[in-house]
Image: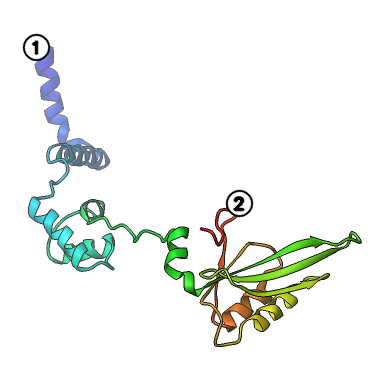
Amino acid sequence: MIGLLCFVLAVLASPFKSKLRLEAENAVLRHQLIVLRRRLPGRVRITTELRALIRRMSVENPLWGAPRIHGELLKLGFEVAQSSVAKYMVKRRGPPSQGWRTFLCNHAPDIAAMDLFVVPTLGFDLLYAFVIVRLDRRDLVWINVTANPTAEWVARQMTEAFPWDEAPRHLIRDRDRIYGSVVTRRLRAMGIRDKPTAPASPWQNANG
C-alpha cells in the first residue's frame, strides 16, 4: 500500500519537476545512448575490396602518404580512419645503401686518396708529408713536405697535383681537422666529390 502511494505521488509530482532537473536527466540518457552505440557496432571492418583499393592507390601514387590517400577515400565516400589507411598501404623499403667495398669496386678508376702524416727528422724536428695516390693503379700522384701544414697549404697541393682536366671524381680522406672548409671548397671547385671515411673505421682505406 505504501509503495503504491509513493508511485501515485511521484506521478502527480512529475509535472512540477524543475526544468534544470529534466535537462540533466536528458543529458545522462543521451550519454548512455552514445556509450551503448559505441559498444554495439565496434570498429568498422575494412572490407577486402577497400584494402585492395588502398594498396592500389599507394602503389600507383608513390608520393602520396596516408593523409592524402585518406582524403581521397573520404571524397569517394569511404568512411575509414587514417590509421587504417596507413596500416594497409604498401610498405616501401628504400634502396640499400652502397657499402664501402662496393663503392671502391664500382668507382676505382675515378678515386684518389690523400693523407697527411708526420715524419720525424734526425734533428728531432717534425715534418708533415702530404701524399695523394690513385686507387686503381696505386700510383703516387703527389707528395710534398712542410713544417707548418695549414688548410690553405693542403688546398694548394690539390690544385698543383691535378690539372683541371685530370682531377678524380672522388677523393678519400680521413676526418683530420686540417681538411676544413678551405679544402672542401677547393674540392667542389675542382669537381671532386669529398669522401671522408667514417669515424673510428681504419678499415676504410684504399685496400677496401
N-term-proximal mark, 1 vs 2: 1
Q: Position of residue 57 (x, y in %)?
A: 18, 64
Left or right side of 64 for 75: left
**Residue behind mark 1:** 1
Q: Nearer the viewer, residue 32 or 23?
A: 32
Q: Position of residue 54 (x, y in %)?
A: 17, 59
Q: Nearer the viewer, residue 101 or 109?
A: 109
Which residue does the image show at 17% across and 43% down from the upper left? 43
Which residue does the image show at 17% across and 31% down from the upper left? 13
Q: Nearer the viewer, residue 78 or 156?
A: 156
Q: Which disc, if any, is residue 200?
A: 2
When the figure is inspected, residue 5 is found, relative to residue 208, above or below; the finding is above
Q: Nearer the viewer, mark 1 or mark 2?
A: 2
Left or right side of 202 for 38: left
Q: Mark 1 is on which residue type?
A: Met
Q: How many marks?
A: 2
When the figure is inspected, residue 41 is found, relative to residue 56, above or below; the finding is above
**Quadrant where the image shows the N terminus:** top left
